[in-house]
Amino acid sequence: MVDLVDFIAHFPILISVEHKLKPWLIVKDIEAIIGNHIQSLNSDYKIENGIAIHKTTMIEKGVTLKAPVIISEHCKIGANAYFRAGVFLAASVKIGPSSEIKSSIICRESAIAHLNYVGNSLIGSRVNFEAGSIAANHFNERREKEIRVKHNGQIFETGLKKFGALIGDDSKIGANAVLSPGTILAKESVVKRLALIEQIPESDN
């Protein structure tokens, strides 16, 4: 199986054993997981209409948040960032201006620079996305849309048509790099600028 703890040492919210061994199921259930977690937050969060923001977080002008969303302590959200439903930011995460985050969990001290897209993904701690880098979540160009992932030489069926990436702690994604749907990166991975990561080519599907 694909064990989440091999990639992310301190995952921020309570999940089931099945979620832990099939991390793409977290993405599948993310809105319910985050919605339930909101109920356990303390008074340090301002909670309104399914959106929870810690009182120490800084949010610049023009940011759009769609519930459910949890933004933890000491986060910084740049102007005109766009959060689609199902986003969890752990402590001290930075999201740059005009970045879009969809149905994703981003762990503590990670940074997503400006003009990025991260869709249906699980991002570890202290991960850095340089400007313009993309975690794609859907095979627009393929006839077969269902996403598979490759880990330790094995291919796993996710059963999903939308799944972005699982990125281990302390990884670095270079500017304008693209992670194809179903990308799995070990801890401390480095993706060069302008790189395309495609772990399962279309001919193998």
Image: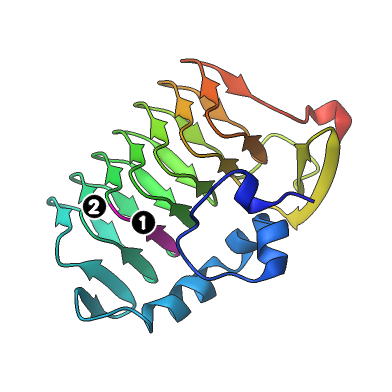
Residue at the disc numbered 2: 75
* Tag of residue 89: 1
- Secondary structure state at the residue bearing disc 1: strand
Please provide percent x and percent y for residue 182.
67, 41
Examine the rendered structure and indicate whether residue 151 appears above or below residue 121: above
User: Which residue is drawn at the image coordinates 48% and 44% (left, top)?
Assistant: 124
- Secondary structure state at the residue bearing disc 2: loop
Examine the rendered structure and indicate whether residue 124 appears above or below residue 134: below
Q: Is residue 34 left or right of residue 41?
A: right
User: Which residue is drawn at the image coordinates 37% and 46% (left, top)?
Assistant: 100
The kind of residue on which mark 1 rests is Leu
Residue 68, picture quadrant: bottom left
Which of the two residues, 174 or 84, is positioned nearer the viewer here? 174
Please provide percent x and percent y for residue 3.
70, 51
Does residue 162 show up? Answer: no
Quarter of the picture containing the C terminus is: top right
Please provide percent x and percent y for residue 144.
80, 43
Residue 187, picture quadrant: top right
Residue 185, picture quadrant: top right
Which of the two residues, 115 or 153, is positioned nearer the viewer here? 153
Q: Which residues are magenta?
A: 86-91
